[in-house]
Amino acid sequence: MNYVLKDREPQAPLHFFEEISQIPRGSGNEEAIASYIENWAKERNLYVDRDECNNLFIKKPATPGYENAAPVLLQGHTDMVCEKNSDTVHDFEKDPIKLVVDGDYLKADGTTLGADDGVAVSYIMALLDAKDIPHPALECLLTTSEEVGMTGAFGFDAKKVSAKRLINLDSDNENEILCGSAGGLRVALSREYSKVPAEGIALNLTVKGLMGGHSGAEIHMEKGNSNKIMGRILFECEKICKVNLVSVEGGSKENAIPREAFATICVPADKVEEVKTAANKLAKDIAGELEDTDKGFTFEISEAIKADKMMDDKSSSDVIAILKLLPHGVRTKSMALKDLVVTSMNVGVVVTTENAVEIHTSLRSSVESLILNLADEVELIAKDHGAKAERGSKYPGWKYASVSPLRDLCAKIYKEMYGEEPKVIAIHAGLECGLFKEQIPDLDIISNGPNCRDIHTPDETLDLNSYARVWKFLLKVLAEMKQ
């Protein structure tokens, strides 16, 4: 194997990052990565427990001088979001991630990189492998399917944990010490339809070029949502004439802001040019709206191969209305913590099956009543337009603690290393920390990680210098944990 990072520091964790990048590990496909790490840990005579969810709980004794120190729990997740550019040939079930070094940055070739959360896995493996790094007893937890509802964390038995302090390594800004996160809820809608003989002229509509991004960390950046834009354009077409859907698709993950959407519709032959004109005019307006936030947006509408079947009138109208009406983006912001989003929603995935159009959404809030209120709104929209709505996986938020010795220690060390105070914040993205706090109420928690941008997109980028600095910071924190 050609290690593209072999000459970079820190060599040990980067070596393990390259190793795990060879193993497909999309959410729900963690069997291979779990087996690899389990066998690797056993070869080093480490205690390793693998549960039915493929969560890995690995323990390493304290180094000399730290025998009386309280243990610390290090945590991350093995799965990654699998997104690729439409022109990239890559099978996430079989192919390794192709790493590309671009100066001081690490990317992948047309796919997501998997730094979320390969960073945590590589740091933890390097610590478990090291013989010259001082630390208290380590309890290391690598969970599964974090990106699709945190099912691994839900299935983990926290009674295995004896540590009362947790360092989560699933963050993406090195100058931030995270001490709180939002809770989340998935809601799936399904609108059944009947097929009828196609009439009129078939048109293909394509929304492309959007940046996408993490629906928690980047929802406030006013990026375009391809599914919502498609709904808006379809609704505009419906003002001209009757529009029958053949299919509508967009996005691939509930928690990723969708970048592309595609629809095929049938319209009366004498309305084709009018529909094209209206759609293109609105698309031009939308491009102007996105000029400062998502300038890559493009829209195309063209005649398609004649369709055999289309959706019935009522179903088509209802699906278009649902796409138009569903909330997306920031709903409420905090008045206590500057720039903190409290409640948001992402219309992440639209897919047409044999008999229904399915829409998958991700709701987030740090306030329980607000996320439930938002779910009620989604269900009312579904009910008013003949669709079924089903609430799916839900995870708790992680509330900011007024007292946190671990937070104080990390802030002190950060200032010593960099000469400035870190940002101590809560975030709108979801972390597994809330689940662990729920099971271990006296758990003292912080989260930190290196700078990583455009997470959940093929533009995902890891700052290698930041990766090295966070590694040094982590080692310094562990070295000072003698109590």
Image (cartoon, rainbow, N blue to C red):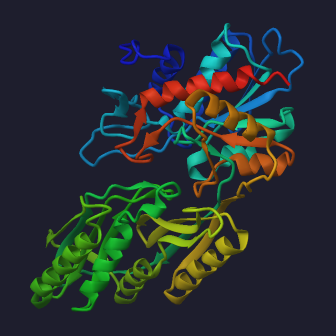
In which quadrant will I find the C terminus?
top right
- What is the x, y in percent for residue 405? 80, 39
Asked if residue 55 shows in the view, the reply is no
Asked if residue 25 shows in the view, the reply is yes
Q: Is residue 71 left or right of residue 392?
A: right
Query: What residue appears at the point 41 percent right and 77 percent down from the top-left corner?
Result: 323
In the picture as drawn, the residue positioned furthest to the right comes out as 68
* Most foreground residue, 436 or 178: 178
- What is the x, y in percent for residue 35? 61, 24
Q: Is residue 100 above or below residue 371?
A: above
Q: Is residue 165 above or below residue 401?
A: above
In which quadrant will I find the N terminus?
top left
Q: Is residue 327 left or right of residue 393?
A: left
* Most foreground residue, 461 or 421: 421
In the picture as drawn, the residue positioned furthest to the front comes out as 419
Circle count: 0
Query: What residue appears at the point 67 percent right and 7 percent down from the top-left corner?
Result: 132
Q: Is residue 379 left or right of residue 113?
A: right
- What is the x, y in percent for residue 378? 56, 78
- What is the x, y in percent for residue 278? 18, 84
